[in-house]
Amino acid sequence: MHSATHQAIAAVWRIESARIVAAVARLLRDIGQAEEVAQDALVAALEHWPTKGVPDNPGAWLMATAKNRALDRLRRDKVQSSKFEQIGHDLEAQQALVAPDFVDALDAVRADEIGDDLLRLIFTACHPVLSTEMRAALTLKLLAGLSTHEIARAFLVTEPTLAQRIVRAKRTLREARVPFELPRGAVLGERLASVLEVVYLVFNEGYTATAGEDWMRPALVDEALRLGRMLTELAAEEPEVHGLLALMELQASRTAARTDASGRPVLLLAQDRTRWDHLLIRRGLAALARAEALCAEQGQPLGAYALQGAIAACHARAVQAADTDWVRIASLYEALAQTTPSPVVELNRAVAVAMAYGPAAGLALIDALREDRALQNYQWLPSVRGDLLAKLGRLAEARAEFAHAATLTHNLRERELLLARAQTLGEPGA
């Protein structure tokens, strides 16, 4: 019985923790304290629910308990004047110090205010004052409700290392006096880019793990999708939010086809497309259509995420690999290169050009990138070059490129794939 109750508590916590931390953080103006209060509410659930039963509305129970704990902290604070300065613009927090019916007032918080709280939490956890690693860890801890152990395992670091990363993130936010508020004006766009970067970082780490024995980490993909869907509800008029969700939904739709029965990677053109998740494809195409419509309404071109979503849509719409519109993909990559120039974008454009106009055309672009320092240790540069050389019949050179690529990756499955390509090219009749 207790085991089932603990599972229920864990499920509720995963769903509700972000809202609880966000609501309490608005009152206390400190993410670290807010998380502590939310954890206190979780401990209270673990103490009471196994004997008294899971309440009819467990999320509301946790929220009310956390708010009560926050009220206790405010009442115990001996320097109330400083508290009033920090939260003076928040009427509900002022009521916490003067009104006996404070908890009842908090329970009447409107749904849109709860949404604003979540946005505040997201923008605070992803503040540029934090390093990328800190932002990712804090976001997964606060917004996804993952435990320190789960995050450490996902990113292949030790639990103490991850815990210290989160502690440093909270301390940095406190010392920098980062306000728990929604940015406005031009700052909003700058900060939104930081938020989207973190969500996509989490997704990419799950979609193709940088290290370890597994090709993918589906749990991280799922959490990134959840964060992306949350953002589209909270920032519904931002085209790039929908563009990022489209990209993630469409890429995630291929998950079941990306490995074989032994867990070995299956590259895009070799995948069984009947195994793609068509619900995710529909959701991705709908998100892309929303991004395109918003861009048209606002008189602006597609952003980087929406362009990548459009590229993913070209693959999703192709029933067979041979049906892929590579000419359009190449043109989309050209637009992406103008929007966000980077060597990796150019590498991907070279692949699309090779598919659209032949391996020699792609190889010419690849060779122009070989001296780029940003790609010196990037395994996909020699891997792509090896593939194009093989198509041109230059097998010895291709083998060398695949072997070199294998030395650059830290992912076991990826290394096996690259070495297998090299070995195959050495066999008779290759």
Image (spheres, rainbow, N blue to C red):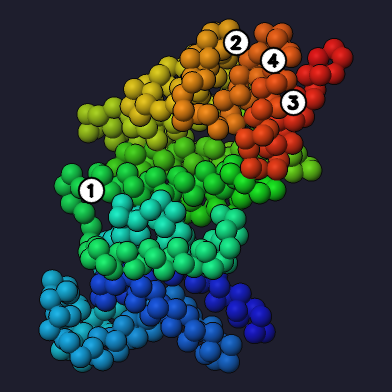
- Residue depicted at x 66% and y 27%: 404
Q: Position of residue 423 (x, y in %)?
A: 80, 25
Name which of mark 4 and mark 3 comes first in the sequence.
4
Q: CA–CA distance between discs 4 and 3?
A: 12 Å
Q: CA distance from mark 4 to mark 2?
A: 14 Å
**Residue 359 bears which disc, if any?**
2
What is the number of callouts on the image? 4
Q: Nearer the viewer, residue 12 or 130?
A: 130
The disc label shown at residue 397, or none: 4
In the rendered view, would you say 303 is above or below 111?
Answer: above
CB atoms at circles 2 and 1 under 8 Å apart?
no
CA gap, disc 2 and disc 3? 17 Å
Q: Nearer the viewer, mark 3 or mark 1?
A: 3
* Residue 96 image offset from top left, x and y in percent: 21, 84
Q: Tell me the number on the disc at residue 223.
A: none
Image x and y of residue 91, in percent: 15, 76
Residue at 45% of width from left, 63% of height from top? 165
Cα distance in 3D space between marks 4 and 1 = 49 Å
The answer to whether 286 appears left or right of 23 in the picture is right
User: What secondary structure is marked by label 2?
Assistant: helix
The disc label shown at residue 421, or none: 3
Residue matched to label 1? 188
